Image (cartoon, helix red, strand yellow):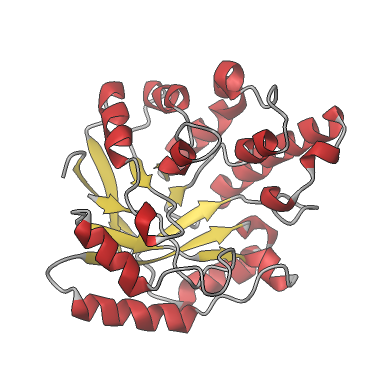
Amino acid sequence: MFDNHSHTQYSGDIPAGHGNSVREMCISAIAKGLTGIAITDHFDIDGIRDGFFPPLDHEGIAFDIAKAREEFDGKLCILHGIELGQATHMPEESNLQLKSQPYDIVLGSVHAVRGIIDFADTDIAGMSKNEYIRLWEQYIEEMLDTIKWGNFDVLTHITYPKRYYLGNGIKDFPDIKSRGREYFEPILKETIKSGITLECNTSGLRQLMGECLPNEDLLRFYYELGGRDITIGSDAHHDYDIAANFDDAVAMLKSIGFTKLAVFKSRKKDFCNLED
């Protein structure tokens, strides 16, 4: 099995000295019995342009991945990936970046909408109800625009802002449990239409949300709509979180009816058995 979403010390959201090297992440993946790992460090393109996040050392990552591939040849498949945030805010620059490296997998994320830095750094508690409802609606709109832009392989953690609404003490909105299908039906349909893979992100199981992103009901809805392209990512920011809660995610996906996981090489999609 692959962990298709991981972050090393290069990611700008990890304080200096607190992250793990590519090599350390690979050692953890091998120890946990994985077949492969995708190194997908954050590249929130507008946040970097505006100086909110440090530039990503693309060449350093590529060098470390090449060294790790040599060291762990035959033991672990190591994918050179990137998590591209807010691509539609700077589409030309995003396309240029994706041409600049031989990526195996590109994750598409929306961590922020126009007008904020990141949901993680937004004072949602200080907003009026109308303001934070509009913020959520804008998130849905910008994610739909991102899918239609389409130059990426995997749509990540689609319920991402929910953790920050909860973290700001807002527990009644968004009501994903009761209204998730209403919120995300256009997103899931466009994802299927575009041939983009949906991510089951396990990070929420070890955080305040207590569920995968998206949750089980949305994954069932995706399946009911005809979605079969699925992958699993831990969103690990430390080596100990590689493949965290994968057993739970696999059991859930099997109960829904999924039998395959999408895997990538040179941005070409293939499938492996869910339990491989």
The residue lying at 27 percent from left, 53 percent from top is 2
85 displayed left or right of 251: right
* Between 117 and 138, the one nearer to me in the picture: 117
The residue lying at 16 percent from left, 74 percent from top is 73
Rendered location of residue 221, percent (x, y): 44, 22
Rendered location of residue 46, percent (x, y): 69, 65
156 displayed left or right of 117: left
**Figure check: 182 above or below 246:** above
The residue lying at 17 percent from left, 39 percent from top is 275
Rendered location of residue 160, percent (x, y): 58, 41
178 displayed left or right of 258: right
Residue 201 visible here: no
* Between 241 and 189, the one nearer to me in the picture: 241
**Figure check: 161 above or below 225:** below
**Figure check: 221 above or below 201:** above
**Figure check: 204 above or below 150:** above
